[in-house]
């Protein structure tokens, strides 16, 4: 179980369109369609991890003491760069692969070039994980492990899991049946990846905010000015569980986050708030985070929708920011006067965002999990199912009084 933390990154999307080299130009067939073609990167995340897995198999004897000192029943994961450096193994190949991964995901390489992966601003994303705690005893007793990585493409279409032994031979493992031999998985640190990815999204959207191209308010009389003496109206996520976290055994714990979406109180533009949910690891388990999920002063009509997404490895966060905002903008622009429909058209925005996600994002990229439509300020929702029946949650109102 990962340590439970609470973090919220706020994204306010202005009402203009960003240009990006990561997204090919495409016209909307309607207000809900957006880029559907997978970008052509120089190397895929899966290919980069394959190279690292093969290198790990070759260097296993040398890195074994470091792995043994870092892997135990309380911790099945170690940082790849630290393992190689502590073992005296050359790290050039790892660094080259990680730079390719960062480029494919739209993450910065600048700090890495300066710090050689030793800094704290952009630490190494790659880690080695013993696939399951049940493998620990056999591995500690000397059973030779395999070294695997997530395949590319839709996990429902995976034929097998490719893995290497210490001699570099390929083994094909079942996708859903946990192997009876120890397996080290080469993977990305999901929490660190999401943390950096959301920072990229914030930066892009902040640039849009400062671009001076915002749509003028159709209702300039509205104001959400708050003083330090006023209470803050929020909604608390008290309990949540998932029926299916979408992951084969090699993918490990899920990493779910929420996209809260609605309309700006003072301008006809979307508001997208990204909420990290690092505690939500496994399906068929109840979690009680007591996490503030909605700040109501940010949303018009005291209503908002929530989309739950699950992180997987191939998402480019620059693209993700563009897709989310552009889809919401297109919907809002298509409504002559949002005030006439009020919060009734929030579902249209959410549906537009979901429909605009490229098809391959419903494979092994950021997986759509479920959506909660039209949550309202001040209301309690007990054992409330998402539209897809995959997520069940309890939301309660919480008013935070001033100090």
Image (spheres, rainbow, N blue to C red):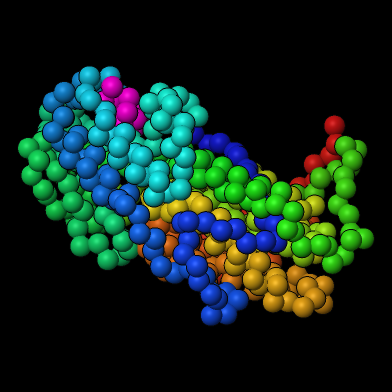
Residue 305: percent from left, percent from top? 65, 63
Residue 306: percent from left, percent from top? 62, 60
> Is the N terminus in the top left, top right, bottom left or bottom right quadrant?
top left
Question: Quick one: 185 or 25, which is closer to the camera?
Answer: 25
Q: How many marks?
A: 0
Identify which residue is drawn at 19% across, 58% down: 160
- Please identify the quarter of the rendering in which residue 66 is found: top left
Residue 367: percent from left, percent from top? 44, 59
Residue farthest along the bottom direction in this orientation: 29
> Is the C terminus in the top left, top right, bottom left or bottom right quadrant?
top right
Identify which residue is drawn at 40% across, 46% down: 103
Is residue 401 among what the camera can see? Answer: yes
- Please identify the quarter of the rendering in which residue 301 is found: bottom right
- Please identify the quarter of the rendering in which residue 261 is found: bottom right
Give yes or no for residue 207 being in the magenta stretch.
no
Give yes or no for residue 76 being in the magenta stretch.
yes
- 198 displayed left or right of 248: right
Identify which residue is drawn at 32% across, 63% down: 154
Question: Quick one: 117 or 149, which is closer to the camera?
Answer: 117
Is residue 182 among what the camera can see? Answer: no
Residue 262: percent from left, percent from top? 70, 62
Identify which residue is drawn at 34% across, 44% down: 100
Specify the segment rendered in magenta: 73-85
Q: Work out whether 75 lies above or below 179.
A: above
């Amino acid at each position: 179980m990962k340590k439970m933390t609470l973090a919220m990154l706020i994204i306010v999307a202005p009402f203009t369109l960003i240009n990006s080299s990561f997204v090919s130009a495409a016209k909307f067939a309607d207000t809900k369609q957006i880029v559907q073609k997978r970008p052509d990167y120089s190397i895929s995340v899966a290919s980069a991890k394959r190279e690292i897995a093969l290198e790990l198999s070759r260097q296993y004897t040398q890195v074994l003491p470091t792995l043994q000192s870092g892997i135990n029943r309380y911790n099945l994961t170690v940082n790849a760069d630290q393992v190689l450096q502590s073992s005296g193994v050359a790290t050039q190949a790892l660094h080259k692969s990680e730079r390719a991964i960062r480029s494919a995901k739209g993450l910065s390489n600048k700090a890495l070039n300066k710090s050689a992966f030793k800094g704290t601003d952009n630490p190494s994303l790659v880690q080695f994980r013993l696939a399951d705690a049940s493998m620990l005893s056999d591995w500690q007793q000397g059973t030779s492990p395999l070294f695997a990585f997530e395949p590319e493409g839709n996990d429902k279409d995976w034929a097998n899991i490719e893995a290497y032994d210490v001699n570099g031979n390929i083994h094909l493992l079942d996708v859903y049946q946990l192997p009876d031999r120890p397996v080290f998985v080469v993977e990305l640190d999901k929490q660190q990846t999401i943390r950096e990815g959301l920072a990229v999204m914030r930066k892009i959207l902040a640039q849009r905010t400062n671009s001076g191209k915002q749509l003028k308010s159709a209702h300039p009389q509205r104001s959400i000015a708050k003083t330090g003496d006023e209470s803050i109206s929020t909604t608390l996520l008290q309990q949540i569980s998932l029926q299916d976290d979408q992951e084969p055994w090699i993918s490990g714990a899920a990493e779910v986050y929420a996209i809260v979406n609605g309309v700006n109180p003072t301008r006809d533009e979307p508001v997208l708030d990204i909420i990290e949910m690092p505690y939500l690891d496994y399906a068929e388990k109840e979690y009680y985070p007591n996490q503030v999920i909605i700040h109501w002063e940010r949303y018009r009509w005291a209503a908002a929708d929530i989309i739950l997404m699950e992180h997987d490895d191939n998402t480019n966060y620059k693209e993700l920011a563009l897709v989310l905002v552009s889809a919401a903008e297109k919907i809002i622009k298509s409504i002559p006067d949002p005030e006439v429909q009020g919060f009734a058209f929030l579902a249209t925005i959410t549906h537009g965002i979901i429909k605009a996600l490229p098809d391959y994002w419903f494979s092994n990229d950021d997986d759509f999990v479920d959506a909660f439509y039209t949550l309202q300020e001040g209301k309690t929702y007990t054992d409330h199912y998402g539209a897809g029946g995959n997520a069940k949650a309890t939301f309660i109102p919480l008013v935070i009084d001033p100090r």
